[in-house]
Structures are given as structure tokens and as C-alpha cells.
Amino acid sequence: MSGDFATAGALGGIRGSLRRVANELEQQNHTASALAQQTRVANHWQTTAFKLQNERSEWKALSRRTLEALEKEEQVSADLRQQLAQAQEALRAEKKLRDDEYNERVEKYNKLVRKSNKLVRCVNTIKGQPGNALALIAALEAELNGQKT
């Protein structure tokens, strides 16, 4: 009987060893599985980081192009504002010149009207005093000659 106990004890020891080995294998499998899972997660994040880095580069390039386009637009706008200001100034100068010419012509017209009115008054005076016609005409000529100088 003691042999049976010894065999049973040995079998129990073997069973215990097998259980430890099985547990260790299970832990190693679990560790390997966890490591594989962690590797997949790390690969996923690495891929995501790479994609984000590429997107960031694309956004930077787009931002740079947009900024360059905006700067060009601002320059074009500034040039157009300057051209508009110059055109408005030229228009003001042209209008002033036309207004000055118009005013000058109005002054000449008014001067001619005044002279014309004097002539009409003189003609009416001559008609009213036909005897003094020669004296009135001489006075009119003297007045007109005096205005020329």
C-alpha cells in the first residue's frame, strides 16, 4: 500500500507540475495575446499619427497658398484703390477746369451783354436826340476805346 501512496503522491506531484506548466502556458498565451493586442493598438495609433501628420502638412500647404493668394488680393486691392483715387483726382481736376472755363465764358458773356446794353441805350439815346447824334457817337467811341486799354 505504501507503493500505491507513493505512486499516488508521484502522480499528484506530476499533476501539480502539469497544472503549473498549463497555468504558465496559459499566462504566456494571455501575455502573448495581450502583447499582440497592444501591438495592434500601437500600430493603429502610429497609422493615425502618420495620417494626421500628412493632413497637417496638407493644411499647412493649403494655409500657405491661401495666405499668398490673400496677400496678392490685398496688393491688387491696394493698387485698385490707388488707381481709383488717382482717377477721382483727375476727374476733380477736369471738372474744376471745365467749371473754370464755363465761369470764364459766363463772365465774357455777361461782359458782352453789358456792352450790348450800353450800345442799345446809346442807340435809343441817339434815336431820342437825333440832333446830338454825332456828339453821342463820338462819346460812345471814346468810351469804347477807353475800355480796350
Image (cartoon, helix red, strand yellow):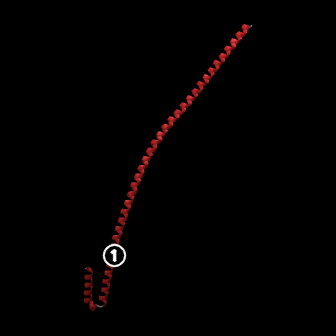
* Residue, disc 1: 107
Residue 136: image x %, image y %? 27, 88
Which residue is nearer to you in this view: 11 or 86? 11
Which residue is nearer to you in this view: 142 or 32? 32
On the picture, is 33 further left or further right than 145?
A: right
Q: Residue at x 63, y 22 (%)?
A: 26
**Which secondary structure lies at badge 1?**
helix
Which residue is nearer to you in this view: 60 or 19? 19
Q: Residue furthest right?
A: 1
Q: Quadrant of residue 110?
A: bottom left
Which residue is nearer to you in this view: 3 or 116? 3
Residue 37 vertical placement versus 98 (above, below):
above
On the picture, is 107 further left or further right than 54?
A: left
Residue 14: image x %, image y %? 67, 14
Q: Quadrant of residue 64?
A: top left
Residue 133 vertical placement versus 108 (above, below):
below
Q: Quadrant of residue 105?
A: bottom left
Q: Amino acid at mark 1?
A: Glu
Residue 72: image x %, image y %? 41, 49
